[in-house]
Image (cartoon, helix red, strand yellow):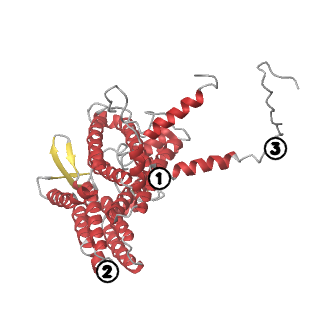
C-alpha cells in the first residue's frame, strides 16, 4: 500500500452504505403539529388578547372615520369630528388598559367596591332632572359640558364584573357557594338594582348585557341547573313584560327577517338598510370610504350599525376578519379563566369574556337581521367613548390575568430586554444570561473551519 506524502499510513475510510429513504412526513401533519405547539405555548392567550384587542381598536378607528364623515358634515361639523373624539377616547383607554394590566390582583379586588359605588351614584344622577340627558329616547347620559357626555350604565358592566367576582371568590374561600342563599344574595338583588336603574332610562340593550354577565357569573360559580333555570325564567318573564309594554320594542321584534323598509305598519328602515349595506359589499367590498348607505340612508352608521358599513366597504373578507378577532379574544378569555387556580381571576376573566362576546353577538346579530335591534355598540369597534373606556380597562384585566399565569410568568422572566441593559466596568453586557452566552459561543465555534486558530 503506497504511503502518504507525510510518511504516515493512510487512513482507512469507512465504506458508505446506501441510504434507504425513510417514510416522508406528511407536510399537512407537520404544519398542524407546529401550529399545535405554538397554540399551546404559555403566552398564547397573552398575545391573543393584546393583539386581538389592538387590531379591533385600530380597525374600529379606521371605520369610525369612514362611517362618520357624512354624518359630521350633515351636522355642519368637520369630517374628522367623530374620529378625533374616538381617537382621544382610545388614547385615554390605552392608558387605562396599561394601568389595569400592571395592577396586582389585590388592587383589582380593592377597586371593586369604589367602582360599584361610583357607578350606582352616577346611574342615580342620570334620573335627576337637569343632570340626566336623553339621547334617542333613552335617558342614560350625563352631560360633561360641551359635546362630551358619559353613559354611567357602561361602567355598571365593569362594576358588576369586579364586584361579583370578588364576592363569589370570598364566598368560595369560605365554602359558602354550596348554599343557594349565599350564591344568590347579595349578587342577584344588587344586579336587579342596576337593571332597574338602567331600565328607568329605557335602555334595554345594556340591561340584556348585564343579565348575560350575571348568568355568566352564576354559571362559573357552579349554580345548579334548577337554580339557573329559575333565575333565567324570572328574567325571561320580566323581559317579556318589558317588551310587550313598549310599542318601540315590539316594532323592533317585528322587523326580524324584514326585506322591505315599510313592511306594513312597522318601519324597518334601519334593519333593512343594514342588510342592503352587507349585500352590496360582495367578497372584498366596494373600497374603504366608498359606502353608499352611510350617505344618510343608514341611521347610526358609525355607532350601532358600523358592522354594516364594514361589510359594504371591506366585504365578506373584512367582516369575517372582525369575527375572527372577536372569536380569538373570546377563546383567550376562556383559556385564562380555565387555567387559573385563583377564584377571583376565574370569575373576573369569565365575566369580562361573557360581557364582550355577548355584546358582540347581540350587535352583529341585529345587523344581520337575526336578532332585534338592541342599540348596543360593537365592543372596541363602534363610536362611543363611554363604551370604549371601561371595555379597554376590562381588556387590561384579561392581560394582567394572562401574565399572572405561572407558566406565563416564567416565560416572561426568561425574555431579555433589548434596550437599557446594564453594562459592566469594561463595557460588557452584564444582563446576558450564561445560557445565552454559551449558546452564542457554541454557534461561533461551529462556524469556524477545522484549520482556524
Reading the image, the residue beneath label 3 is: 20
Mark in the foreground, 3 or 2: 3
Observer-nearest of 299 and 11: 11
Q: Is residue 367 visible?
A: no
Quarter of the image that includes the C terminus: top right
Return the residue nearer the eye: 56 or 335: 335
Quadrant into which the N terminus falls = top right
- The residue at the far top in this view is 5
Residue at x 35% of width, y 35% of height: 70
Does 298 sit left or right of 133 as displayed? right
Indicate left or right for 218 with 35 as reference.
left
Give me the C-alpha separation between circle 3 and circle 2.
69 Å
Look at the numbered disc 2 and give the secondary structure of its residue: helix
Q: Which label's residue is closer to the chain start, 3 or 1?
A: 3
- Which label sits on residue 180? 2
Report which quarter residue 263 is drawn in. bottom left
Q: Position of residue 223 (x, y in %)?
A: 37, 75
Q: Earlier in the sequence, mark 3 or mark 2?
A: 3
Q: What is the crowding at mark 2: few (fewer than 14 residues within 10 Å), some, or many (at least 20)? A: few
Q: Which mark is residue 143?
A: none
Q: Which label's residue is closer to the chain start, 2 or 1?
A: 2
Q: CA distance from mark 3 to mark 1?
A: 46 Å
Label annotation for residue 327: 1
Work out whether residue 28 or residue 114 is closer to the camera in this orientation and state it.
Answer: 28
Residue 162 falls in which quadrant of the image?
bottom left
Q: Residues within 10 Å of mark 3 (few under 14, many from 20)?
A: few
Query: Does residue 292 sit above or below 329 in this rendering?
Result: above
Q: Disc 3 vs disc 1: Cβ atoms closer than 8 Å? A: no
Q: Is residue 276 visible?
A: yes
Amino acid at each position: 500500500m503506497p504511503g502518504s506524502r507525510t510518511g504516515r499510513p493512510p487512513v482507512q475510510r469507512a465504506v458508505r452504505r446506501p441510504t434507504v429513504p425513510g417514510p416522508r412526513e406528511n407536510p399537512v401533519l407537520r404544519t398542524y403539529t407546529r401550529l399545535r405547539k405554538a397554540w399551546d405555548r404559555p403566552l398564547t392567550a397573552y398575545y391573543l388578547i393584546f393583539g386581538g384587542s389592538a387590531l379591533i381598536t385600530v380597525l374600529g378607528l379606521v371605520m369610525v372615520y369612514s362611517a362618520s364623515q357624512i354624518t359630521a358634515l350633515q351636522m355642519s361639523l368637520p369630517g374628522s369630528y367623530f374620529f378625533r373624539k374616538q381617537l382621544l377616547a382610545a388614547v385615554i383607554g390605552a392608558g387605562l388598559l396599561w394601568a389595569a394590566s400592571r395592577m396586582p390582583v389585590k388592587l383589582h379586588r380593592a377597586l371593586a367596591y369604589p367602582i360599584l359605588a361610583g357607578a350606582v351614584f352616577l346611574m342615580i344622577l342620570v334620573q335627576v332632572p337637569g343632570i340626566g340627558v336623553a339621547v334617542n329616547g333613552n335617558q342614560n347620559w350625563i352631560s360633561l359640558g360641551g359635546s362630551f357626555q358619559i353613559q354611567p350604565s357602561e361602567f355598571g358592566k365593569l362594576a358588576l364584573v369586579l364586584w361579583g367576582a370578588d364576592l363569589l371568590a370570598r364566598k368560595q374561600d369560605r365554602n359558602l357557594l354550596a348554599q343557594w342563599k349565599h350564591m344568590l344574595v347579595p349578587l342577584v338583588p344588587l344586579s336587579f338594582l342596576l337593571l332597574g336603574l338602567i331600565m328607568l332610562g329605557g335602555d334595554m340593550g345594556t340591561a340584556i348585557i348585564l343579565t348575560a354577565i350575571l348568568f355568566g357569573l352564576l354559571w362559573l360559580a357552579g349554580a345548579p341547573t334548577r337554580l339557573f333555570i329559575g333565575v333565567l325564567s324570572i328574567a325571561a318573564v320580566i323581559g317579556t313584560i318589558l317588551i310587550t309594554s313598549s310599542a318601540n320594542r315590539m316594532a323592533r321584534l317585528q322587523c326580524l327577517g324584514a326585506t322591505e323598509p315599510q313592511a306594513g305598519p312597522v318601519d324597518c328602515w334601519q334593519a333593512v338598510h343594514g342588510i342592503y349595506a352587507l349585500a352590496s359589499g360582495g367578497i372584498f367590498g366596494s373600497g374603504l370610504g366608498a359606502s353608499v348607505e352611510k350617505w344618510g340612508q343608514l341611521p347610526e352608521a358609525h355607532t350601532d350599525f358600523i358592522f354594516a358599513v364594514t361589510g359594504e366597504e371591506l366585504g365578506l373578507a373584512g367582516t369575517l376578519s372582525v369575527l375572527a378577532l372577536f372569536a380569538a379574544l373570546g377563546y383567550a378569555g376562556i383559556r385564562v379563566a380555565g387555567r387559573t387556580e385563583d377564584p377571583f381571576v376565574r370569575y373576573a376573566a369569565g365575566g369580562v369574556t361573557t360581557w364582550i362576546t355577548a355584546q358582540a353577538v347581540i350587535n352583529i346579530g341585529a345587523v344581520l337581521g337575526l336578532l332585534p335591534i338592541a342599540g348596543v355598540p360593537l365592543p372596541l369597534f363602534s363610536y362611543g367613548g363611554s363604551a370604549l373606556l371601561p371595555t379597554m380597562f376590562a381588556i387590561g384585566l384579561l392581560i394582567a390575568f394572562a401574565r399572572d399565569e405561572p407558566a406565563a410568568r416564567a416565560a416572561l422572566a426568561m425574555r431579555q430586554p433589548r434596550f437599557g441593559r446594564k453594562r459592566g466596568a469594561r463595557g460588557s453586557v452584564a444582563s446576558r444570561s450564561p445560557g445565552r452566552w454559551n449558546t452564542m459561543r457554541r454557534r461561533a465555534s461551529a462556524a469556524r473551519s477545522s484549520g482556524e486558530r
